[in-house]
Image: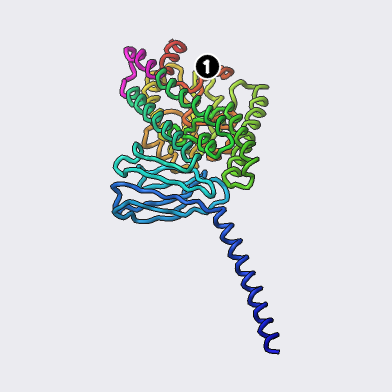
């Protein structure tokens, strides 16, 4: 009798043990399947805090951190179902973006005193791809910033026209080199999440490298490719959502332009000024008008305004006007910027951006942007002209 009871107890214990082992085995299998490890060593970083962030389109979230010891060694475990973007940073100037897959064992070494030039990463092909991309982008931005500083240092004068034109051509050469490199990168790595990083490169804050209508084809190539491999990835879903939004704006822009051509070649604009009065672009027929688009939060726009003020003062009494549209969300910020910078021309604001009908009509993909229109407002004479080019054109048009 006792032996039967003991046998029954043993069977129950055995069954429970098997269940526990099965659960543990399943859990360990799942964890191992989805866990990546990031290890490494940072020289000359004793006492500094090292952060691991997860990054996506809109934010960075701190996942873990540690204070580095004398030997500079670190180790982080990363749980992810899909290849995802991360940032390892000591500070804003000592950081590296990584693309890590499940199961990867990534090794990173660097010297905190010379982070970029001593950085070495192994065990992650995706990380290698985006580090290569980011290094080329940083080099390009450095060259472009240098050219812009030299350009801005030359006063607007006849003797500087040739020098500025040479600098403009050099700028275009550097920009186009990186643009072509990035297209090749997207096509080569269209099945890698690294291609997402390439599509959203910023040449300057708010100014994206891929900003033309024809660039939609590259977004579509990447969306179609990544959906096959990672249909449930949040990064892929956000990319697809952005593509659909861009494409919808493009279609809307086409329809609105078709509607406008019945009466006008130049799209209509009627927007409120600082006093709330509606100001119609068509009121300035008879003058050559520069229709300008900007925002107070965009640094390039502010620089552009300062240069345009010199040209405006020379030609404002000769049949020239600037009709400037701000895409600020806050009327207070816009009004403050107009007063602070003492902008002397027609200033109106469209707070509906980026869902702005005006932005769609003029196909605004980056700021600043401008269109020089003729006196009859039935033709666009030039697009995105610099202050120097505008001065040259006005000399011909108004003299």
Residue at the image position 34 percent from the left and 47 percent from the top = 42
Residue at the image position 45 percent from the left and 24 percent from the top = 175
Question: Where 97 falls versus 398 (above or below)?
Answer: below
Percent of width and height locating residue 32: 55, 55
Between 207 and 342, the one nearer to me in the picture: 207
Q: Is residue 2 visible?
A: yes
Residue extending furthest toward the bottom = 1
Percent of width and height locating residue 369: 49, 27
| Secondary structure state at the residue bearing disc 1 | strand
Label 1: how many Cα within 10 Å (few below 14, some 14–19, many 20+): some
Between 282 and 225, the one nearer to me in the picture: 225
Left or right: 1 in relation to 26: right
Taken as a whole, is the magenta stretch helix, strand or loop? helix
Residue at the image position 55 percent from the left and 19 percent from the top = 380
Q: Is residue 301 visible?
A: no
Q: Name the residue under label 1.
A: 381
Indicate how the structure is coloured in the image: rainbow
Where, quadrant-wise, is the N terminus in this rendering? bottom right
Asked whether residue 166 is drawn in magenta, I would say yes
Between 290 and 70, the one nearer to me in the picture: 70
Between 399 and 317, the one nearer to me in the picture: 399
Percent of width and height locating residue 283: 54, 25
Give the magenta part as a residue range.
153-168
Question: Where 164 falls versus 62 (above or below)?
Answer: above
Total numbered badges shown on the rendered structure: 1
Question: Where 264 falls versus 250 (above or below)?
Answer: above
Where, quadrant-wise, is the C terminus in this rendering? top left
Percent of width and height locating residue 22: 62, 65
Asked whether residue 112 is drawn in magenta, I would say no
């Amino acid at each position: 009798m006792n032996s039967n009871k003991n046998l029954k107890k043993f069977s129950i214990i055995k069954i429970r043990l098997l269940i526990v082992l099965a659960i543990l085995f399943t859990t360990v299998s799942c964890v191992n399947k989805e866990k990546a490890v990031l290890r490494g060593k940072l020289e000359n970083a004793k006492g500094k805090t090292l952060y691991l962030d997860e990054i996506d389109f809109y934010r960075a979230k701190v996942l873990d951190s540690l204070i580095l010891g004398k030997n500079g060694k670190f180790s982080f475990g990363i749980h992810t179902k899909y290849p995802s973007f991360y940032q390892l940073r000591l500070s804003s100037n000592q950081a590296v973006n990584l693309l890590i897959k499940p199961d990867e064992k990534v090794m990173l070494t660097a010297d905190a005193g010379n982070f970029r030039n001593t950085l070495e990463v192994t065990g992650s092909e995706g990380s290698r791809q985006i580090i290569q991309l980011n290094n080329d982008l940083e080099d390009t931005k450095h060259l472009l910033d240098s050219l812009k500083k030299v350009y801005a240092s030359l006063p607007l004068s006849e003797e500087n026209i040739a020098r500025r034109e040479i600098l403009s051509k050099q700028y275009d050469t550097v920009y186009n080199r990186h643009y072509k490199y990035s297209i090749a990168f997207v096509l080569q790595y269209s099945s890698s999440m690294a291609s997402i990083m390439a599509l959203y490169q910023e040449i300057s804050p708010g100014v994206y490298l891929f900003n033309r209508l024809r660039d939609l084809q590259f977004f579509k190539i990447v969306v179609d490719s990544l959906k096959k491999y990672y249909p449930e990835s949040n990064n892929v879903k956000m990319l697809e959502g952005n593509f659909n939004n861009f494409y919808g704006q493009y279609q809307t822009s086409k329809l609105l332009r078709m509607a406008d051509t019945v009466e006008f070649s130049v799209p209509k604009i009627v927007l409120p000024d600082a006093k709330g009065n509606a100001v119609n672009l068509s009121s300035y027929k008879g003058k050559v008008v520069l229709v300008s688009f900007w925002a107070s939060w965009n640094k390039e726009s502010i620089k552009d305004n300062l240069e345009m003020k010199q040209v405006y003062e020379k030609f404002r009494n000769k049949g020239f006007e600037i009709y400037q549209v701000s895409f600020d969300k806050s009327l207070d910020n816009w009004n403050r910027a107009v007063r602070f910078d003492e902008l002397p021309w027609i200033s109106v604001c469209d707070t509906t951006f980026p869902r702005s009908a005006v932005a769609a009509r003029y196909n605004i993909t980056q700021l600043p942007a401008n269109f020089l229109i003729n006196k009859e407002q039935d033709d666009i004479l030039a697009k995105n002209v610099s202050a120097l080019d505008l001065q040259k054109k006005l000399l011909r048009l108004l003299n």
